[in-house]
Amino acid sequence: MILSGIFCALVLLSSQIFTVSSEENLDAHRDVTLRTKAETYLQIRKGSSFKIAIFADLHFGEAASTLWGPQQDLKSAKVMSTILDNEHPDFVVYLGDVITANNIPIENASLYWNQALSPTRSRNTPWASVFGNHDDASFEWPLEWFSASGIPPVDCPSKISGEACSFKGTSRLELMKNEIEQNTFSYSRSGPKNLWPSISNYVLQVSSSNDSQVPVAFMYFFDSGGGSYPEILSTAQAEWFRVKSQQLNPDARLPEIIFWHIPSKAYKKVAPKFKFHNHCVGSMFGETVTPQEAEMGIMKILRKRSSVKAVFVGHNHGLDWCCPDKKLWLCFARHTGYGGYGNWPRGSRILELTQDPFSIKSWIRMEDGHKHSDVLLSS
Ligand SMILES: [Zn+2]
């Protein structure tokens, strides 16, 4: 108990030290309780690669008011545990649609969010999360809860009563605040305030195993909207990336990888029209890409920047490919959760960064242990 207390204190302390101080002047309206500072680093272990597991579209809380729903959450937790024990990643990315907020009939959806983090947290593995279109969607009253005439009063289930029945949803900001405040291993951030209500916009540095101050790569996280507001990456987000990447990596010498939830329209263009497209690597090509509502310039900036190696998205549960878009790779994750539409077997896209020589490899690890779709994204 004492030891774990000391360990927690040390982690807390080190997370303070890890923060890059040059950021302090940039986010003028910083909130003390919300870590809007953008940078933190993750150091590659000596003699090791840096491995990331992407958990996409977990949809915890799907059909939460039924018996079936919670069973799916248990199965999703098992998928994550299996992947974590099989791959032993250094870091996990929760790539949005962590919960199905529109099915969650309680005021604090963070309880479900927290369940989704649990397998990673219990293994002391650090993680970061971004928002998808379901995470702060408004609760949709099940029709069977209404009176026979179809008009309220609502027939709230007996365990949910009083004020909970007027529940409106848990905001992105609240979800992020709870994640950060309650989890030492969370590297998530609530992003610069000038981008709100788009919240999960931040950058993390991957540091050299020799020197924690020496970056070897940068990971950018974006909130691609959906739920409480449109499914877009805004001009302001594109500009934030342009300024931030120029500041942190001015000569574009170090590789950058990008994570967000909803595919951009560019994914539709590179998507193979026929199965087994020559240049793409993956096992699922059958579904139509459902892209963001509008393209506000981010892809143009990413394509122009030679250091950007790959973009990773979720959202389409039936797609798991990586396709080249000129020098950039556009990749889907792999549907990890038992919540959400589709019955494709569950798994996780894994990324592996090596330092010397630099490379980014990726593959998909399935729940049953099977590994496939190996691809070299950068070397
Ligand atoms: Zn989803």
Image (cartoon, rainbow, N blue to C red):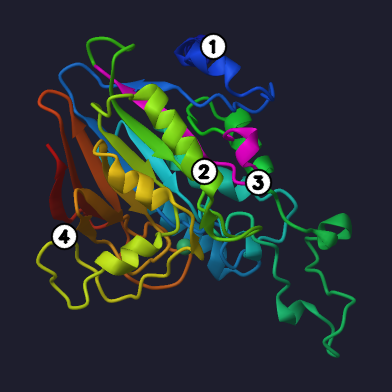
Crowd tier of the residue under label 2, counting other residues whose Cα lies within 10 Å: few below 14, some 14–19, many 20 or above: many
Q: Are marks 1 and 3 in contact (CB under 8 Å)?
A: no
Q: Disc 4 residue type?
A: Val
Q: Which mark is residue 9?
A: 1
Q: What residue is disc 3 on?
A: 197
Q: Which mark is residue 237?
A: 2
Is residue 355 visible in the rendered image? The answer is: yes
Foreground tag (1 vs 2): 2
**Foreground residue, 107 or 133?**
133
Asked if residue 276 lies left or right of residue 186, the reply is: left
Q: Residue 325's quadrant in the figure? A: bottom left
Crowd tier of the residue under label 4, counting other residues whose Cα lies within 10 Å: few below 14, some 14–19, many 20 or above: many
> Dot 2 lies on which element?
helix
| Residue 221, image x, y percentages | 44, 40
Q: Which mark is residue 281?
A: 4
Report how far apart the C-alphas of labels 4 and 2 lie in the structure: 29 Å
Asked if residue 280 lies left or right of residue 255, the reply is: left
Q: Is residue 237 above or below residue 314?
A: above
Q: Mark 1 or mark 2: name the one nearer the start of the chain.
A: 1
Report how far apart the C-alphas of labels 1 and 2 lie in the structure: 34 Å
Q: Disc 2 residue type?
A: Gln
Q: Are marks 2 and 3 in contact (CB under 8 Å)?
A: no
**Residue range corresponding to the magenta coloring:** 190-208
Report how far apart the C-alphas of labels 2 and 3 lie in the structure: 11 Å
Foreground tag (4 vs 2): 2
Q: Mark 2 or mark 3: name the one nearer the start of the chain.
A: 3
Residue under the point 24% across and 61% down: 321
Q: Is residue 291 magenta?
A: no
Crowd tier of the residue under label 1, counting other residues whose Cα lies within 10 Å: few below 14, some 14–19, many 20 or above: few
